[in-house]
Image (cartoon, coloured by chain):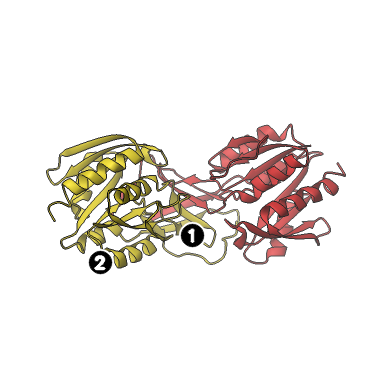
Chain colours: A yellow, B red
Amino acid sequence: MRILITAGPTREYLDDVRYLSNASSGQMGYALARSAIQAGHEVALVSGPVTLSPPEGCELYPVETTDEMFKQCEKLFADCDGVIGTAAVCDYRIKTRKPGKIAKTGEAITLELVETIDVLAELGTQKGDRWVMGFALESQDARFNAVRKLYSKKCDAIVLNSVSAIGSTENHVEVIDHSQETVATYSGPKAQVADSLIAWIQEHIAAGK
Amino acid sequence: MRILITAGPTREYLDDVRYLSNASSGQMGYALARSAIQAGHEVALVSGPVTLSPPEGCELYPVETTDEMFKQCEKLFADCDGVIGTAAVCDYRIKTRKPGKIAKTGEAITLELVETIDVLAELGTQKGDRWVMGFALESQDARFNAVRKLYSKKCDAIVLNSVSAIGSTENHVEVIDHSQETVATYSGPKAQVADSLIAWIQEHIAAGK
């Protein structure tokens, strides 16, 4: 198979220096890329700014903003069999980015944030006979929100992980499919969880396509 | 001498996941720490989240927010002979941090940002007979703003660098002192610029104390 994987955070700039982001390290996405290549697949990895090196044999497409990630993914998805969306994209961007560096004035400033494009939901809409696996990071009503995202993003399955996964080398995940039940649970180092998830994808959502 | 050095970015959180930050890599501060230790000084390095390892023999104090950086610096400054402020601190924090992860609703959201404490200006106010070297990163009216900061932060000298220095391994800097003139200019890899700056500090602002 040829698999599209998104990884890392994205950044949304206020001005030329300051941005909105999150502490996603990209480890889960890079671990999945490595596992997929080891399992004999091709991987196109679209990654926000992280400090990891891509696994050997992996095509890397570095991006910075959510919009850049979407445009790169849309181009690549056409030639892929499926997509795994691990990226912790910025859901919000600053409505009006200022040039240069906003100088301090002693006053409070007000920023208007608007939602960015939902990368995985857009790919889900375009998926046709390709499979889509999402990741959901939820701080409350986790299962309810994961199932909601499974449908709204037109995923075949969604991986639920907790806020504690960000930046950690370990992960504890549940895979939820259209049965709305947890159909697999994996814990341990992200490399090991990645192997299990690639095997699960091969056996379940990719097998039926 | 015992030198306090601040380095890296700081982060200011909107909620438990998203934050405001910048792409400061910490390279200039870590290079200065290395140069200072090689020149026989002690270094206390207060650093925001970066991926660098501190030089051997350096005391590292990791912090995340601007307020944490200030509190840590204030504690350490009492026992230091001077401070070099290279950190690209978040000048703004979100007025009301939300618990958990703000869920998307499809609506725009408005954030009120208030200024954070000015770490170097506070240390400048407390400096007594210690020396203070600041860094200014300016996108416009660079010299004017650098001189303004030299006085407002009670620095003995200020190093002016441009936005292009962020995340780069190279730097081009000008040192401005109370003459309001550029009294030294250094270009090249940050490690080399750091050696020159430590030598300059020893010879000029630290010598007179």
On the same chain: label 1 and label 2? yes
Q: Between residues B10 and B97, which one lies in front from this camera angle?
A: B10
Q: Which residue is mark 1?
A: A14
Q: Between residues B191 and B166, which one lies in front from this camera angle?
A: B191
* Label annotation for residue A78: 2
Classify mark 1: helix, strand or loop. Answer: loop
Residue kind at label 2, given as amino acid type: Ala
Please rate how many residues cluster around mark 1, counting C-alpha atoms within 10 Å: few if below 14, some from 14 to 19, many from 20. many
Residue B59, image x, y percentages: 65, 34
Q: Is residue B79 above or below residue A152?
A: above
Q: Between residues A8 and A81, which one lies in front from this camera angle?
A: A81
Q: Is residue B134 left or right of residue A194?
A: right
Residue A109, image x, y percentages: 51, 56
Q: CA distance from mark 1 to mark 2?
A: 32 Å
> Is residue A163 in sight in this rendering?
no
Residue B158, image x, y percentages: 74, 54
Residue A204, image x, y percentages: 16, 47
Q: Is residue A58 above or below residue B10?
A: below
Q: Residue furthest right?
A: B208
* The quadrant where residue A180 appears: top left
Viewer-side label of 1, 2: 2
Please rate how many residues cluster around mark 2, counting C-alpha atoms within 10 Å: few if below 14, some from 14 to 19, many from 20. some
Q: Is residue A102 left or right of residue B160?
A: left
Classify mark 2: helix, strand or loop. Answer: loop
